[in-house]
């Protein structure tokens, strides 16, 4: 027991007011503690605080960037300003005041936003990698940005409906022209609003309007939109995107847009320019686009322009071998090969025939057709093929194939095969040499290039180099399922359709197995047993240029089979284009990295074929009307411009 008087403690009395919780007390106590520290201890603490401050300041922009989106220097007028990129290429759902894709994401998409394809395939998707992987990827992004910059500086080395009242839209059409007009069904006149197809068609029209908005505001009359920098790129200086998109606007029933573009063609477009153009690219995009628009509208404006550009391209055929040069100066009337070689690309010289043949038929001037037919006849007889497969280069002096022994259905050879079949169809199935070459080539594909992947046995088309097989497949090869299906539709063996279906699945998987749901430019298939997944992508091949080939094939496969899965696959792809490539201020952009949904890395370029081909094939895929560009009446050129199948008498 303690006596109540006894005090076993020391009493401390604080002077001044307030209790021990007061700020003043705490300040004094801290100060005392500080004074009690040695000089060394104080210096160490001061140094640590200073270090933390410096680090905090240095990392502040990165942290905030993470929340606000990455930044890029964008040239605006004379000055350079920092502009947010991510808000411009936002996932669609994050954006306000943007046209929304009408259909909400499915439950499956909500659950697994970055994994696509059947569950088996999803599970095999590689986990996104280690720190070093990410570092390598960063380097790759930088390299790809550099490459894109360079690409912008030099010309690309290529390889590779909407009711507009016809009477209002066409001026000065003759009775013959009126016969040529296509009755494009009036989508808006019928009530389809309860059908999912209607939403999907509207989504394509929205996508087109959005792409057009960017082109109109920042690139009007120029070749290509650069949507991020809100500027344009020039290739030939001929309004490439506008011309490539003409027939798409007609088919999508975008009347206003079509009329403003038509006014530009009639008042601004001139081919009397001192510019070098690539024969193949200007034939498929400009000549093809003008001829097709003439057929759809019956307006002679487009035929006159087609004749003008076609005539200006003819000097390309003045070569010792009659195999055309790659480049023509359409102002001077001179032509030449590329600076570094006298070779032309095989696909380029054999994929201009549909257009020049049609120009001859319309103008009754046989010179255009004679020039391109001669190329086909020469190529038909050439040595150096393997089982009907052609090398990638041909010499304009000797007329012989060069770089022998390398075979692909991708870049530099692809549309050779496509045009063998399509010329045969265009000409009323009479030119048997074309058919023979096509059938033989397909046997060559089956024998030399067709393999199965592991683990899912996807059928793919690889490449052959001096007898060595490579499991590499370009996205460009995805034209093949559609072409095979088209051949089967026109009476070729039924096993072509079977192969078409298998390859279609493969092309879809090239999208579905990527984290963004968008295909890379090139994939490598795994063939070894025990592989974890079918598709590998090299760092340099991760870009997506908004290419059309898979959507094109989906369109053919749906038209001929009516299997709705092809439409659903296309719908998935359209939504992913909207999610990862749509730029909020207008337009769509190519991207550098389909494996990174967080930062797909915009390339700042909208290729003309996105409007000319990709969006057109989406629309046709979702349309229920088989007469909207009937495949019994039309054949599409390799840039998706429909040209008529000739009446059997011609
Ligand atoms: C287009 O210009 C044509 O489809 C061509 O045949 C291949 N390259 C692009 C699209 O990818």
Image: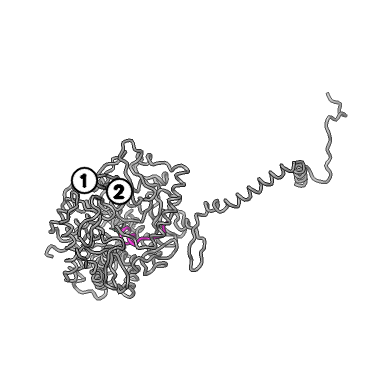
Q: Is mark 2 within 8 Å of ligand 1?
A: no
Mark 2 or mark 1: name the one nearer the start of the chain: 1
Stretch in magenta: 602-614
For the point 41% across and 44% down, which residue is it? 112
Q: Which of 378 and 482 is in front in this view?
A: 378
- The answer to whether residue 488 is seen in the rendering is no
- The answer to whether residue 428 is seen in the rendering is yes
- Give the residue at mark 1: 446
* Secondary structure at numbered mark 2: strand
The C terminus sits in image quarter: bottom left
Q: Residues within 10 Å of mark 2 (few under 14, many from 20)?
A: many
Q: Residues within 10 Å of mark 1 (few under 14, many from 20)?
A: some
Magenta stretch encompasses residue 410: no
Locate residue 84 relative to residue 312 in the image: left or right.
right
Q: In which quarter of the image is ligand 1?
A: bottom left
* Secondary structure at numbered mark 1: helix
């Amino acid at each position: 027991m303690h006596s109540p008087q006894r005090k076993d403690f020391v009493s401390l009395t604080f002077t001044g007011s307030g209790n021990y919780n007061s700020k003043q007390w705490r300040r004094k106590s801290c100060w005392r503690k500080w004074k009690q520290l040695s000089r060394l201890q104080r210096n160490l603490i001061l140094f640590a605080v200073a270090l933390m401050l410096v680090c905090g300041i240095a990392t502040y922009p990165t942290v905030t960037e993470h929340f606000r989106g990455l930044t890029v220097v964008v040239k605006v007028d004379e000055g350079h300003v920092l502009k947010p990129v991510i808000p411009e290429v936002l996932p669609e759902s994050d954006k306000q005041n943007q046209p929304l894709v009408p259909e909400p994401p499915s439950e499956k998409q909500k659950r697994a936003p970055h994994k696509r394809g059947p569950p088996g395939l999803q599970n095999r998707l590689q986990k996104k990698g280690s720190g070093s992987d990410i570092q390598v990827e960063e380097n790759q992004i930088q390299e790809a940005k550099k490459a894109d910059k360079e690409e912008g500086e030099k010309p690309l080395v290529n390889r590779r409906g909407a009711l507009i009242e016809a009477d209002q839209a066409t001026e000065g059409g003759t009775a013959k022209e009126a016969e040529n007009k296509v009755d494009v069904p009036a989508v808006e006149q019928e009530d389809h609003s309860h059908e999912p197809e209607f939403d999907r068609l509207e989504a394509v029209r929205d996508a087109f309007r959005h792409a057009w908005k960017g082109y109109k505001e920042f690139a009007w009359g120029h070749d290509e939109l650069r949507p991020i920098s809100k500027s344009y790129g020039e290739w030939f200086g001929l309004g490439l995107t506008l011309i490539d998109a003409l027939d798409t606007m007609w088919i999508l029933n975008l009347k206003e847009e079509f009329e403003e573009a038509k006014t530009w063609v009639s008042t601004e477009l001139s081919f009397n320019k001192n510019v070098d153009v690539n024969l193949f690219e200007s034939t498929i995009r400009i000549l093809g686009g003008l001829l097709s628009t003439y057929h759809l509208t019956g307006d002679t404006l487009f035929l006159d322009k087609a004749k003008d550009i076609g005539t200006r391209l003819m000097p390309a055929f003045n070569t010792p071998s009659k195999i055309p040069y790659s480049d023509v100066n359409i102002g001077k009337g001179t032509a030449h090969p590329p600076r570094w070689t006298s070779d032309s690309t095989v696909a380029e010289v054999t994929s201009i025939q549909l257009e020049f043949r049609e120009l001859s038929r319309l103008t009754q001037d046989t010179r255009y057709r004679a020039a391109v037919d001669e190329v086909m006849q020469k190529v038909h007889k050439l040595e150096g093929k393997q089982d009907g497969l052609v090398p990638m280069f041909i010499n304009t002096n000797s007329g012989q194939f060069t770089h022998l022994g390398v075979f692909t259905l991708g870049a530099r050879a692809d549309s050779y095969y496509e045009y063998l079949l399509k010329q045969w169809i265009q000409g009323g199935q009479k030119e048997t040499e074309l058919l023979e070459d096509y059938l033989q080539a397909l046997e060559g594909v089956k024998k030399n290039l067709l393999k199965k992947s592991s683990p899912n046995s996807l059928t793919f088309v690889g490449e052959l180099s001096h007898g060595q097989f490579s499991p590499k497949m370009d996205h460009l090869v995805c034209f093949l399922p559609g072409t095979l299906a088209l051949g089967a539709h026109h009476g070729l063996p039924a096993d072509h359709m079977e192969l078409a279906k298998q390859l279609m699945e493969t092309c879809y998987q090239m999208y579905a197995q990527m984290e963004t749901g968008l295909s890379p430019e090139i994939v490598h298939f795994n063939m070894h047993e025990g592989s974890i997944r079918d598709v590998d992508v090299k760092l340099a091949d991760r870009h997506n240029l908004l290419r059309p080939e898979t959507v094109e094939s989906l369109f053919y496969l749906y038209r001929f089979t009516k299997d709705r899965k092809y439409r659903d696959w296309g719908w998935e792809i359209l939504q992913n284009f909207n999610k990862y490539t749509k730029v909020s201020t207008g337009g769509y952009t190519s991207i550098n990295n389909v494996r990174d949904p967080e930062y797909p890395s915009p390339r700042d370029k909208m290729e003309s074929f996105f409007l000319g081909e990709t969006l057109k094939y989406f629309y046709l895929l979702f349309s229920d009307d088989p007469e909207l560009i009937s495949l019994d009446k039309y054949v599409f050129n390799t840039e998706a411009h429909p040209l008529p199948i000739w009446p059997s008498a011609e």
